[in-house]
Amino acid sequence: MKKLWGGRFTKTAEEWVDEFGASISFDQELVLEDLDGSLAHVKMLSKSGIITEEDAALIVKGLQSLKEKATNNQLEFSVKLEDIHLNLESQLTDMIGPVGGKLHTGRSRNDQVATDMHLYLRKQSETIIALVEEMQTALLTQAKNHVETIMPGYTHLQRAQPISFAHHLMAYFWMLERDKERFTEGIKRINVSPLGAGALAGTTFPIDRELTAELLGFSGIYENSLDAVSDRDFILEFLSASSILMMHLSRLGEEVILWSSQEFRFIELDDAFSTGSSIMPQKKNPDMAELIRGKTGRVYGNLMGLLTVLKGLPLAYNKDMQEDKEGMFDTVKTVTGSLKIFAGMIETMKVNSSQMESATKNDFSNATELADYLSEKGIPFRESHEIVGQLVLTCVKKHVFLADLTLEEFKDAHPLFEDDIYEVLNPVTAVKRRNSAGGTGFEQIRIALEKAEGKLKAR
Ligand code: ARG
């Protein structure tokens, strides 16, 4: 088959060489973006008087019928035609005749592919933002049901201080809120048009770049034609926002895995998001959470991969840049899939409130309450810390917990202890009293839930 760029060649490459260089197996994902870019380009060509209105009308009709076929999955692509751009151009010409060849006037595949990628990532970023919100909604709904469900809060994975389960869930809500901001911010730089940069230097034709940008809904154009076709920062930013998002999902995944273990039994995942074992009949495994934790590595890899592809490239386009696509498609698929799974997993999980609460009782996570108690009565905190530390040691030796000590024992440690300390030691009281801004106190959580709801409504 004669190449669309075959004019200066006397020999054709062997099939396996063609196959190695081809991107059609994956860049067919860009079919609709490519057709939209072409539609905008051809409309501009005719408006600027570069091709006649009649020719443009024929091309537009051809492109629209290709679009219809693409939507119905009726297009067939050939490796011999290398990539999505050449495949579509060839099908257009097959359909409407040699006039189809006028479409590529004043354009190169270099600005064409860049345009496709910008259009693609704009759409995908918007989808991801909507999916992040679905997951935020799932977190918010569970949180609302569990304001007064208390659990141990951890540092170093050691019980630290009791907290509300809602507070724990809402920590992830705010992480996701920042993720959303990162994707939204990214769209600013995605939404810029490289179309009309040509191969690298612009074109001799009197094209109107502002017009194609407007037709494609871009908010502006790249200022420099070399930069326009060489820039992949917008993909790196997307991969980086995706990596941070996946890191958040992975951390929550890890907690979900721990919480559903027999050692914790804080939650039970719905059967729909768990799997069994082929040998151990009793098993119910949190596979989906594990898989999301695992897939996070892939997304990081995609970011590192593209950074590495780009680091040594001279301006402008180099074929290396064809390697920007698979990692990006893979990331989109992984991130959207993970968000959907996670929203469902959070929505349907059963929370074992009594198990959580009892985990706050038989430990020393109320020791800080006791130290705060003395300090509220004027003892310097360092001194209170020391006194309570000694009391903890006494308890450890006697195999009891703080609330098991008698008032005499407390008074021996410090005369300022009164019998109201037993109420102070109650983990529910401990949570309730942490009413500083952003703290786990029930009042603060209610304020936070309202703010969070406002964030979701604002969009
Ligand atoms: N398939 C190519 C890519 O994805 C399209 C651009 C090709 N440009 C070129 N000058 N070979 O990067």
Image (cartoon, grey):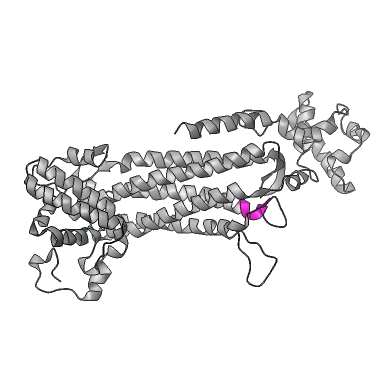
For image coordinates 38% across by 38% down, the residue present is: 185
Look at the image and tell me in which quarter the C terminus lies: top left
Percent coordinates x, y for residue 238 in the rendering: 38, 48
Residue with the most extreme right position:
408
| 379 w.r.t. 242: above or below | above
Residue 187 or residue 411, whichever sits in front? 187
| 279 w.r.t. 209: above or below | below
Percent coordinates x, y for residue 18 in the rendering: 23, 71
* Ligand 1 found in image quarter: bottom left
Q: Start and end of the magenta stretch?
A: 255-269
Percent coordinates x, y for residue 116 in the rendering: 27, 51
Look at the image and tell me in which quarter the N terminus lies: bottom left
Residue with the most extreme top position:
378
Percent coordinates x, y for residue 120 in the rendering: 32, 49
Asked if one can make out residue 312 in the rendered structure from this viewpoint, the answer is: no
> Is 95 on the left or on the right of 345, as rendered?
left
For image coordinates 66% across by 28% down, the residue present is: 443
> Is 126 on the left or on the right of 159, as rendered?
left
Asked if one can make out residue 297 in the rendered structure from this viewpoint, the answer is: yes
> Is 277 on the left or on the right of 402, as rendered?
left
> Is 324 on the left or on the right of 3, as rendered?
right
Instruction: Give the mark count.
Output: 0
Residue 227 or residue 53, whichever sits in front? 53
- In the image, is residue 256 part of the stretch drawn in magenta? yes
For image coordinates 67% across by 54% down, the residue present is: 260
- In the image, is residue 17 part of the stretch drawn in magenta? no
